[in-house]
Image: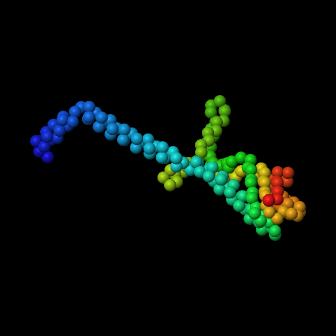
Amino acid sequence: MSSQQVWKKISSFRKIGKEKLILLAFAGILLIGSSYFESVGHDESEEPTSGGNQQSEIYEDMIKDEIVKMIESIDGISNVQVMVTFQSGSEKVLQEDSDSSINENGDKTVKKTTVIFNQNGGDSPYVIKEIYPKIEGVAITASGLQESDKSAEIINMIAALFDIPVHKISVIKNK
């Protein structure tokens, strides 16, 4: 590029004006800043711990489906609907490393840190096990419950499967 061409470009900037150049620079800074904040927010939304609620819902739906299948397999029972209440949400037990040391006074200090590993380009805690929520109560409606012993059989089956007291299980005949 010759020096004449360079001077032409510089003079073209002078024609734009200081205010327009400042606005243009400010717009560029805003674009760069917004892309930075977008990438920071995007990383936070992909944390693996946010999927905990979704796994609980999948577990709860699976339990309901299994109960419906078991009851509908009983001769004469149909149109089964189930509602299950849970004591709490699921709980994840994380792997922890601990370092213990004894200071000059003879006091023991324990420092615990959660084990983190890199998975799919992101850091996540190492989960040892997941404790699913305990079933607190079950309500069942079904057609074909004319015989009272069928209701009692269903109550006993649910109590045995989920280790819940029979007074927390309700079986009612549908319309």
Q: Position of residue 19 (x, y in %)?
A: 26, 31
Q: Residue furthest bottom?
A: 75
Which quadrant would residue 81 be assigned to in this image? Answer: bottom right
Left or right placement of residue 12 versus residue 81 in this view: left
Asked whether the viewer can see residue 169, the reply is yes
Q: Residue furthest front?
A: 175
Whether residue 129 is visible here, answered yes or no, is no
Give the residue at x 51% y 45%: 44
Placement of 11 over or under 124, stated as above or below? above
Query: How many tags in the picture?
Result: 0
Q: Which residue occupies the foreground of this view, 10 or 175?
A: 175
Residue in front for this viewpoint, 108 or 133: 133
Residue 12 % position (x, y): 17, 38
The quadrant in which the C terminus is found is bottom right
Task: Tell me which residue sits at (13%, 39%) in the image.
Answer: 7
> x, y (%) of residue 109?
64, 36
Does residue 146 lie above or below 48 as drawn? below
Q: Which x, y percent locates residue 111?
A: 61, 39
The residue positioned 81% from the left and 68% from the top of the image is 76
